[in-house]
Amino acid sequence: MNKMKTDLISEARDHYSVIFPCGDKVSFDECFTSNGDQLLFWFNTEDQSTHVMTKTLS
C-alpha cells in the first residue's frame, strides 16, 4: 500500500476514531477507487454509515 493510501486511512481514523472496510471488503486496500485525478477512500464507521475521503493524485 502506498503512502497516499496510508495517509487517507490515518486521516479517517483521526476524524472518526474507529473505521471499517466498506461493504463486503475484507481489507482497507480494497476500499480505494481512482476517478480522474482523485484517489477515493471508502469506509464505514461504527454507526454503519459509509464515508468517502479524497486526495488529489500528483
Image: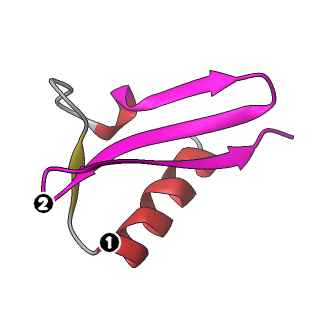
* Circle 1 residue: 16
Q: Callout 2: helix, strand or loop? A: loop
Sequence-first disc among 2 and 1: 1
Q: Secondary structure at mark 1?
A: helix
Indicate left or right for 27 with 39 as reference: left
Q: Quadrant of residue 34?
A: top right
Q: Nearer the viewer, mark 2 or mark 1?
A: 2
- SS assignment for the magenta stretch, majority: strand
- Toward the right, the furthest residue is 58
Report the span colored magenta.
Answer: 30-58
**Residue 19 is one of the magenta-drawn residues:** no
- Whether residue 29 sits left or right of residue 11 in the image: it is left
Q: Amino acid at mark 1?
A: Tyr
| Residue at 48%, 41% in the rendered image | 41
45 to 20, vertically: above or below = below
Rendered location of residue 4, percent (x, y): 63, 49
Residue 1 lies, with reference to residue 8, above or below; the image says: above
Type of amino acid at the residue the image marks with label 2: Asp
Quadrant where the C terminus sits is top right
* Residue 42 locus on image (x, y percent): 40, 39
Q: CA distance from mark 2 to mark 1?
A: 11 Å
Q: Which residue carries the number 2 mark?
A: 47
